[in-house]
């Protein structure tokens, strides 16, 4: 990309004219979208498990232009876009698609605070879909591919004393390239949703010393009663790391080790175990010391817990938390928003869905073929919601004939090029890195319903090696291979177990999908999708209870988890417990909570 090297000052100064911004179109808005202040969008610190005291949020109004792919930077821009919302969303203020033949070019200016002089300056992106190339003052500072994971560039050499011009150019191939894409689709209908492109999570700057922590890896080990700590840092010899674990009452315990080498902190006698009923978190202070001087400090948190499987009642393999059987019961959580699409209008909105899930008596969420900002996982940690983390699918359909086969048979897999496979593993590894320190994440799901399912045995084993502390559900409702920790069945609307695996936990990874249309709270008043429709809330709740009883009967046959579809309506799907705009709860909340609490406690005496 050829960039201008000389700019007129007035063209460099980006007018952050909040009064000129409005959501585009006349579509559905959430309450948070309606009250959104473009000058204060997503102001929360975006990385809760590695927080620094100083940072500069770059969210807000940027200039944008949609250009032909591989074109030079435009001489003029099309207008302003509200970052971090995708151009397809209403809250971006743009509201148009970006095709595979186009790119979106972003531009804004910023100044480095005076107190940051002499520091290294890191430019951080929460997530950009899909290929990002970044320039600062005409200097290319880096690039990244992958639509779901954070990345960082040290931009110090390219900085100037006054206004700094940041340009981000993004290409999203959509379905033209086989890459992880989840439920995005060129044609949004039934269970497929609007395409996403560009920046969709927070962009921010932070100052650090030349020697600084780049990543924390925290691994609780209940068998050995310790916390393993690995503080990765910029390459500096003889750097020490001091970690202090603190509880709410001020009790503290510390340990020291070398940077870039795992060391251990003993689990104190007063430590409590994390669980959905007791989501106990402990604060961590992590200091990097060089020649006895603290050169970097980050705040984090952790918890003590263990996910495993074991044979229990009548030889049934159960999901275990802290060596006790626990029935995982939760919602299929798509994480889409009518006004922000991939991006929640605020962190308060992001937490709202999880708070409702907890209030309704669930103890788990399955994050369905999407990845969320780090703050979402922090909310699950503090609320006590176990997370099943899906890998976003490459393809939306399985090979021909898979769905026509008996579900307990091994069917054909998808075939991909070596690049497509390597790209999948690259991004799956980055996703696991993102959620690794989150105590609530208990299960990884590499594939969903045979969509893009390839090399299942290898992929499951790869995942187990990459993170041996979590369980792996190889293919939720998909092509069944005898590998991993879980055998997962999907069936709508009633839960069904087609076969029982004596050596793995047996689960119903999707069922339900009970639909209720709420007039005035529809996405676009087009064709609806549901698995079973009901006239009113009472009828829906009655059927919910019937299916809950069916699930409880399956527990006696060995089922150890259930996932109900779903938290909210999503675009044309109207089978949520809430409407897409979150303004109407469709169920009797107290009744549903009573039903759910029976289910989550069904293994208490096993």
Image: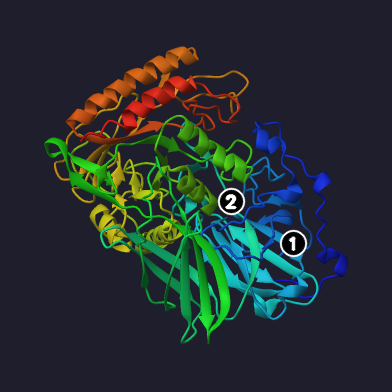
Q: Where is residue 330 in the image (x, y as percent from the top left)?
A: 39, 35
Name the residue that disc number 2 marks: 197
- The residue depicted at 79 percent of the width and 59 percent of the height is 76
Q: Could you say where residue 596 lies in the image, as x and y percent from the top left?
A: 38, 27
- Nearest to the eye among marks 1 and 2: give it: 1
In the displayed structure, does residue 120 sit left or right of residue 175? right
Residue 35 is drawn in which quadrant?
top right
Given contact means CB atoms under 8 Å apart, are the residues at marks 1 and 2 in contact? no
Q: Can residue 341 be seen in this view?
A: no
Q: Quadrant of the C terminus?
A: top left
Q: Residue 509's spot in the image, x, y percent? A: 32, 37
Residue 80 shows up from this direction: yes
For the residue pair 143 and 53, the one nearer the viewer reads as 53
> Which residue: 31% across, 32% down?
601
- Residue at 76% across / 51% down in the picture? 80
Would you identify the image quadrant in which residue 505 lies? Answer: top left
> Which of marks 2 and 1 precedes in the sequence?
1
Q: Which mark is residue 108?
A: 1
**Count of picture labels:** 2
Which of the 4 image quadrants contains residue 388? top left
């Amino acid at each position: 990309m050829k960039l201008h090297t000389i700019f007129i000052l007035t063209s460099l100064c980006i007018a952050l004219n909040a009064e000129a911004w409005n959501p585009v179109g006349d579509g559905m808005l959430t309450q948070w979208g309606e009250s959104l202040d473009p000058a204060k969008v997503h102001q929360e610190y975006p990385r809760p498990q590695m927080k620094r005291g100083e940072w500069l949020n770059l969210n807000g109004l940027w200039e944008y232009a949609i250009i032909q792919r591989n074109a030079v930077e435009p001489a003029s821009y099309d207008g302003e876009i509200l970052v971090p919302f995708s151009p397809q969303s209403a809250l971006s203020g743009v509201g148009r698609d970006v095709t595979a033949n186009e790119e979106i070019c972003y531009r804004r200016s910023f100044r480095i605070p005076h107190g940051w002089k002499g520091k290294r300056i890191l430019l951080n992106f929460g997530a950009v879909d899909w290929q990002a190339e970044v320039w600062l003052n005409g200097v290319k500072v880096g690039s990244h591919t992958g639509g779901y994971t954070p990345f960082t560039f040290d931009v110090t050499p390219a900085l100037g004393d006054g206004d700094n011009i940041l340009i981000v150019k993004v290409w999203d191939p959509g379905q033209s390239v086989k890459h992880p894409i989840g439920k995005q689709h060129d044609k949004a209908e039934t269970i497929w949703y609007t395409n996403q492109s560009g920046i969709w999570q927070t962009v921010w700057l932070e100052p650090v010393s030349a020697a600084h922590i780049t990543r924390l890896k925290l691994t609780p080990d209940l068998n050995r009663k310790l916390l393993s700590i690995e503080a990765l840092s910029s390459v500096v010899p003889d750097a020490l790391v001091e970690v202090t674990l603190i509880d709410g009452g001020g009790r503290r315990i510390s340990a020291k080790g070398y940077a870039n080498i795992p060391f251990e902190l003993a689990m104190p006698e007063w430590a409590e175990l994390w669980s959905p009923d007791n989501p106990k978190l402990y604060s961590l202070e992590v200091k990097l010391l060089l020649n006895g001087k603290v050169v970097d400090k980050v705040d984090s948190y952790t918890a003590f817990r263990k996910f495993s499987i074991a044979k229990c009642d009548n030889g049934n393999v159960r999901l275990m938390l802290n060596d006790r059987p626990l029935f995982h019961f939760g919602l299929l959580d798509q994480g889409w928003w009518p006004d922000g699409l991939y991006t929640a209008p605020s962190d308060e909105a992001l937490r709202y869905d999880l708070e409702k899930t907890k209030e309704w008596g669930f103890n788990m969420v399955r994050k369905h073929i999407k990845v969320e900002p780090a703050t979402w996982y922090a909310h699950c940690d503090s609320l006590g919601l176990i997370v099943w983390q899906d890998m976003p699918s490459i393809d939306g359909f399985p090979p021909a004939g898979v769905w026509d086969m008996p579900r307990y048979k091994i069917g054909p897999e998808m075939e991909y090029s070596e690049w497509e496979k390597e790209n999948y593993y690259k991004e799956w590894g980055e996703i696991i890195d993102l959620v690794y320190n989150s105590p609530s994440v208990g299960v990884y799901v590499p594939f969903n319903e045979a969509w893009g399912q390839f090399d299942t045995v290898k992929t499951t084993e790869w995942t187990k090696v990459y993170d041996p502390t979590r369980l792996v559900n190889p293919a939720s409702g998909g092509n069944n291979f005898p590998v991993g920790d879980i055998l997962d069945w999907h069936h709508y609307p009633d839960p069904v177990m087609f076969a029982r695996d004596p050596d793995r936990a047996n689960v119903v990874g999707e069922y339900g999908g009970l639909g209720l249309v709420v007039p005035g709270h529809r996405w676009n008043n087009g064709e609806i999708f549901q698995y079973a429709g009901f006239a009113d809330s009472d009828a829906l709740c009655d059927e919910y209870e019937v299916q809950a009883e069916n699930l409880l009967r399956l527990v006696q046959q060995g089922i150890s988890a259930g996932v109900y579809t779903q938290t909210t309506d999503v675009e044309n799907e109207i089978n949520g417990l809430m409407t897409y705009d979150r303004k109407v709860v469709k169920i009797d909340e107290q009744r549903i909570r009573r039903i759910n609490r029976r289910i989550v406690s069904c293994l208490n005496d096993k």
